[in-house]
Amino acid sequence: MIPLHIKIMLHHSISSERYSLHDSAHASSEAVRDYHDELVMLGMLDKVGTTVYYQSGYKVTKKGEFYINYLLSVPVPSTKYVIEFDLPF
């Protein structure tokens, strides 16, 4: 998965609106449509048709919810300093 897949998944997990990163031209681009199709093929998204509740036409599946929760559980890296020194023996 690439970052755009993850952005699309996160968007659909919190919003029923149509995905649009910057503008409507981006949302209707061939690349974004292809990525949506790939996520459907992977079982992460379901096509539900455009309704009052799902204006985007997609919703996250249980598999997609599990993946998102896994990503959110990854701890943020922290800095750890290590001092190296030679032992006398």
Image (cartoon, rainbow, N blue to C red):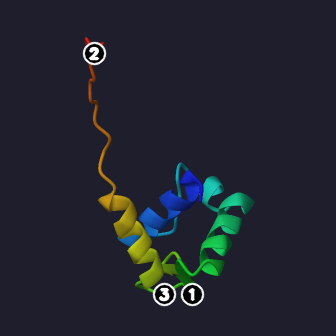
Residue count near mark 3 (Cα–Cα under 10 Å), binned few <14, some 14–19, many ≥20: few
On residue 73, the disc is none
Query: Badge 2 is on which residue?
Result: 89
Identify the element where label 1 is drawn.
loop
Quadrant in which the N terminus is drawn = bottom right
- Residue 80, relative to residue 4: is it above or below? above
**What residue is at 53 percent from the left and 48 percent from the top?**
22
Tell me, yes or no, whether the two marked residues, 3 and 1, touch with CB atoms within 8 Å. yes
Instruction: In the rendered structure, find residue 49 and report the number of the disc placed on it.
Output: 1
How far apart marks 3 and 2 lie (CA) works out to 74 Å
Given the image, on which type of amino acid does mark 2 rest? Phe
Q: Residue at x 51, y 68 (%)?
A: 18
The structure residue drawn at horizontal position 37% and vertical position 66%, both measured from the top left corner, is 70
Q: Secondary structure at mark 2?
A: loop
Q: CA distance from mark 2 to mark 1?
A: 72 Å
Q: Which residue is mark 3?
A: 51
